[in-house]
Amino acid sequence: MQHENSHRSGPTTFAPLRNPVFRSIWISTQISSLGWLVQSVAVSWLMVTISASDLMVALVQAASTLPAFFLSILAGAIADNFSRRWVMFAGQCLIALASIALTISVGAGFVHPWLILGLAFLAGCGFALNDPAWHASVGDILDKRDIPAAVTLMSVGYNIVRSIGPALGGVILAFFGPLTAFALAALSDMAPPIAVWRTKWHVRSSPLPRERMTTAIHDGVRFTALSSEIRAAIARATLFGLGSISILALLPLVVRDHLASGPIVYGVLLAGFGMGAFTAGMSNGFLRRTVSQNSLMAVASVACAACCVSLAMTSSVVVAVIFMAIGGAGWLITWTATDVWVQLASPRWVVGRTLSIYYALTYGGIAAGSWVWGAVAQNYSLTWALMAAAVALLLVAAVGIVLPVRAWEESHQESFDFPTPRLALDLKPRSGPIVATIEYSIPDQDTDAFLARMRAKRHVFSRAGARNWTLQRNLHAPSLWTETYRTPTWMDFLRLNHRLTAADKEVGQHLAALHDGQHPPHTVLSIERTTDAARSRASTIFARPPR
């Protein structure tokens, strides 16, 4: 892992930019994002001119975002099983290919609505591949202490670009035409793959072979479901997205109906939103050091609620811009906090999958929120929709009491130093199921402490892949306890133990300290066998005595 020098004052927002790998990819990503936003404006306008269907126009946005929702978990499994650098490169090449193909087709005069949708979908697949791998790579490129600042920079960069990209796209479209916009976007989309191609970073790799995709997805979903910290982050982010998207989703209606203005004011309001996000990003490090993260996220939700109330009540453009800046600050603080929360709560072996699940569900919350608030505005009124969204955001702020943010100081780096047990049978990777049993001798006065440690161990091992975990007490000798768990195969057993972090292994050390036997607790491994003759003959293929 490439680490930067430590600073006693703590990392600043710009500290990650001292790392040449992160700096190169970050700058190229901003260039590409600017080109993508310019292209989005041109594509939407082009679709309006060649298709009379409102549905086809609306499908442009859906075609580029649906892959991120449906393919996100698969993309996360790919990012955790293959080189994240090459996964990023592949995704960025798909985006560039889609942009180049669109430019060539427009230049050749061959433009069809379904072609535009197909290329938008291809670009969306590229984003679905790139985003989990890029965000997961931040922890490989930088030191853990720089991850919050890096995530903040990524959010700030995109919000700045989003403030100027659509306006720039409109200017280019008006003065030079769509072909120029597409050509510039294609050129900008070449920057990220070039940056990734020219940079390299070291990643600690597992000595075990890659997981099958189905197993990798299952283990990622299982880890996420059993991690209360990640579940809390996803729940809060999804609820926040559901409520806060009302600001951006209803903004065109606010400009038209409440402010009686046009595209220029709409652009000014978006710029205010972006500047608020920029200001919050620049002060995010200071805020994290002076205010608890839980309080900061609650205040951010209240800020977005205040923005909704302002947009519902005011007819002043100046007031609307001020509160859009406040909403932008709350928007960035929340998304940065939850992204960092998921990253720091995830070991490196599964971080791509946990991030992808986080993105899939938060995208779903944002999409649902856009539909809900639009439906409320259509069936009731715009003011009702914004006020209801404000109430929802206040409830999201209160959710922090039930689902608080916890600081993560311990290491979540797997060690990969588990020695392969010496066995009397020559097991194949697919041999199994494997049964592990550990016997403990616990004095009566330590029973409560033992059970508390066992609950922690069950949680740790179940997240890492243990199945059917049980704890039995000997009825003849009550001081004897037996822990049992299973893995589907021998390779799954090895993989489980390679995934354990230093903090996970401390749980076993605490249990060993409670053990009152003559010898330390010892893991006894067995392989299950059926008494069915046909299946028994087949299973012996996978477990033979060594010759």
Image (cartoon, grey):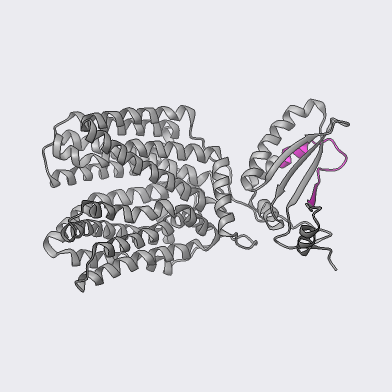
Determine the residue located farthest toward the top in the rendered image.
Answer: 445
Residue 519 sits inside the magenta stretch: yes
Place of residue 34 in the rendered image (x, y in percent of width and height, measured from the top left): 27, 57
Specify the quadrant of the image occupied by residue 258: top left
Question: What residue range appears in magenta?
Answer: 508-526
Count of numbered circles on the image: 0
Q: Is residue 162 above or below residue 451?
A: below
Residue at point 81%, 46% (across, down): 522
Q: Is residue 145 visible?
A: yes
Left or right: residue 407 versus residue 448 is left
Q: Is residue 249 magenta?
A: no
Q: As drawn, is 51 to the left or to the right of 149?
A: left
Q: Is residue 84 above or below residue 296?
A: below
- Which residue appears at 32% of the width and 56% of the height? 63
Q: Nearer the viewer, residue 449 or 148?
A: 449
Residue 263, x across and y down, in percent: 14, 47
Please state which of residues 30 and 244 is positioned toward the viewer in this rendering: 244
Say left or right for 53 vs 462.
left
* Quarter of the image with the N terminus in it: bottom right
Q: Residue 518's image quarter?
A: top right
- Residue 439 image offset from top left, x and y in percent: 81, 40
Q: Quadrant of the C terminus?
A: bottom right
Residue 209 location, x and y as percent?
63, 63
Frontmost residue, 493 versus 375: 375
